Amino acid sequence: MAVLARGVAAAILLFFMTAAGFAANKVIIILDASGSMWAQIDGKPKLEIARESLRTVLQSVPADDEIGFMAYGHREKGSCDDIQLIVPPQAGSASAITDAADSLKFLGKTPLTAAVKQAAEALKYTEDKATVVLITDGLETCGGDPCALGKELKASGVDFTADVVGFGLTADEGKQIACLAENTGGKYIQASDEKALQEALVETVAAPAPAPAPAPVPEPAPAPEPKAAEVDYNLIPQAFLKEGGEVPKIDVYYEVFKDDAKGASGDHVDSGYNVVKFHLAAGNYIVVASSGAAKAEQKVSLTADKATELALNLNAAQISIHARPAPGADVDRNAQISIAYPGGTSDSNYGEVKYVVPAGETKITVKLGAGEASETLQLVAGQVVDKDIVVGVGKAKANAFYTQGGEKAETDVSWKVYKAAKKLDGTRDQVTYAYGADSQFDLPPGDYVMGVDVQAVSTEQPFSVTVGQMTDVNVTLNAGVLAVDAPGADGFKIYEAKKNIQGERKQVTYAYGEKMQTTLAAGDYVLVTNFTTDKADKETPFTMKAGERTELKVE
């Protein structure tokens, strides 16, 4: 798995390089944050491989390169407009990009064509050299034409290149998006599995460079004075949860600073992740190790001829949290896990998380829909905790039907869930809401009322929720659909046919224009049509039948 992560990292880094091997001036990385990134390669979600690869690669990017970060599909499940430039192109953006990638949700669609176009425009590709790096594990799902876009950007750009990593795509799928890269003079690399990725890297990275022109033979230099042999690496740091304890099972980031008056905020010398070795000039340094929310630093003096192994004590514990809706249920990827540890909070965790926190009191809170569960842990240095947190919710799936067992309502359906018990003033507390057919709600056990509005129809239905079970809430509207066509009309008003004791009718709904369509409960009504001319308003009585469509033509 580590080889694959390093391979993906190398493929991304390759895209930062031009044919001559120099970093591009301005680059925007686009990361596919669609729901398919939860799929696994060798037991590890692709989204985690991508996050780790970005973190590793960005440490190697020259500090003056202007790197930006864009994602799509990370905020809404069904939207083709869910594209966001999270980090604008700027120098020194590595930490901002890795933080952004770590906080992404992966749940939406794949508007990759529109994303590449927006990234090119953000880079002002018609005025300056621009490079876009797209990392996608899926094909276009929003109607875009990546091949045509590639030609368009190449034709109108000053020096535009799009490079594409097909992460987990088949060969046939890769052909459908490779044209985006090829039409801009960029590269397409297929990283469908470990072997294929390695072959792609051998083909591109290990290609022989042109032989250099023979250099003149210099005069022999005088033999140097004998000196002590230098070691290949003179600093080998390693972080532990406690002195003599375990190494963290998540990434550890090491930074080396000069030991001067500025301390760890002074001159940055080098950095690396996990198992790392440094070759540094002899001198005094400060080494900082970070893992999750824990951090340790230590001073060290180095010489060129001796390897120093440095142990850093994080004084921390490692927790693995798995959020489950009910006992024995699978992890729910929609559950948010919040970790409040000494000195801070981490909220960007969903489903399950492995994290390192400073020793002390740590509160874990899991939220899933309207359900919430929390637990407070008193953690000591070196402790390793693997824990399920059960929210204790069931699911309710809501649909509305025009008649019992009849056709499902699909348009303009909105839901509100209320607690069943009424308050002293006769109202109920609203718990949550949603829109559309097949809406699902995670709810604590208990009694509720489901309210539904479908255009001019409103109704309610009580239901109960049991932990770990799905409840189908099928609401019968007892309604039909009315369609009105009235050429020259300015608008409509619909009233109940029956008058009250004052001789007035109750208005049900209204609309503007010459046509209208709405859902109405079964019963007798009067349609009042208003005309734009001097023509008098016209009343048309009609009857709605449940499950039927009624069409009225008003002349």
Image (tube, rainbow, N blue to C red):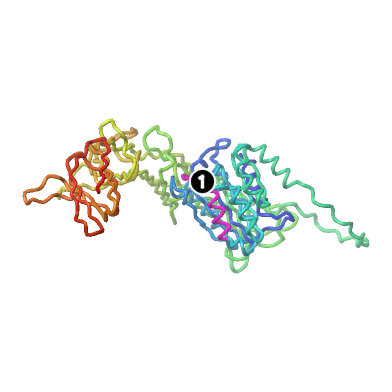
Residue 257 position (above or below residue 42): below
Residue 496 position (above or below residue 226): above
The residue at 73%/43% (across/down) is: 203
Q: Measuring from the top left, give residue 349's x and y in whole percent.
A: 45, 47
The stretch of residues the image draws in magenta is 106-122
Furthest residue to the top?
A: 405
Q: Is residue 382 visible?
A: no
**Few, some or many residues within 10 Å of mark 1 (<14, 14–19, 20+):** few
Task: Give the quadrant of residue 416.
Answer: top left
Residue 114 within the magenta-colored segment of the rendering: yes
Furthest residue to the left?
A: 501
| Residue located beneath label 1 in the image | 143
| Total count of labels | 1
Q: Measuring from the top left, give residue 455's x and y in whole percent.
A: 27, 46
Task: Give the quadrant of residue 296.
Answer: bottom right
Looking at the picture, tell me which residue is in the foreground, 253 or 55.
Answer: 55
Residue 109 within the magenta-colored segment of the rendering: yes
Q: Is residue 486 left or right of residue 116?
A: left
Q: Amino acid at mark 1?
A: Gly
